[in-house]
Amino acid sequence: MVAGPVAAVGAVELLGSMWVTCRVGVGNANGIRLLMCDLPALLVLLAALMLPTYGLIAMRSIRWALVVSLSLAAGVVWVYLALNHNPGGDDPAAFCPPDNVPPWWPSWIPL
């Protein structure tokens, strides 16, 4: 049950760090968007996905419920970061070439 809120906050924090590193957009506007729009939307999405799944699977095995909820959280975070790391797709990648992926991002995780 904790995986959803932790994943949402972690995703918003990761995206904010990516934008700061690559100098995407305007700092204050980015922070307001992330906290007021993206965080509540991610919380609702993860709750809508996890609560029924966790409830159905937990009746049979708590281990499977944890595996499925963590997998769902990781999948939602990856899709969120892949869609939003380069907003608009036309931002200059002078600071994080190519495609505004920061240098600290692991190369084995595609965006």
Image: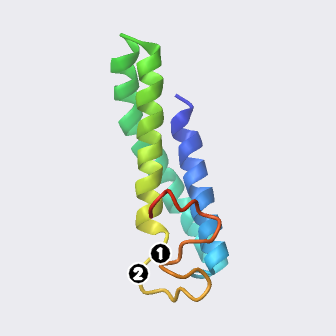
- Give percent across and percent down for residue 9: 59, 49
- Give percent across and percent down for residue 110: 45, 61
User: Could you give the CA–CA distance between mark 2 and mark 1, rounded to whole angstroms?
Assistant: 5 Å
The amino acid beneath tag 2 is Gly
* Element under disc 1: loop
Residue 88 appearing in the image: yes
* Element under disc 2: loop
Which residue shows up at 40% across the image and 45% down it? 45
- Give percent across and percent down for residue 52: 34, 27
- In the image, taking residue 78 as reference, residue 60 lies left or right, namely left
Q: Residues within 10 Å of mark 2 (few under 14, many from 20)?
A: few
- In the image, taking residue 60 as reference, residue 38 lies left or right, namely right
Quadrant location, the C terminus: bottom left
- Give percent across and percent down for residue 2: 57, 31
**CB under 8 Å between discs 2 and 1:** yes
- In the image, taking residue 6 as reference, residue 108 lies left or right, namely left
Q: Which residue is mark 2?
A: 89
Numbered tag placed on residue 86 in the rendering: 1
Which residue shows up at 50% across the image and 59% down it? 38
The amino acid beneath tag 1 is Asn
**Residue 61 higher or lower than 73, as above or below:** above
Which residue shows up at 36% across the image and 37% down it? 49
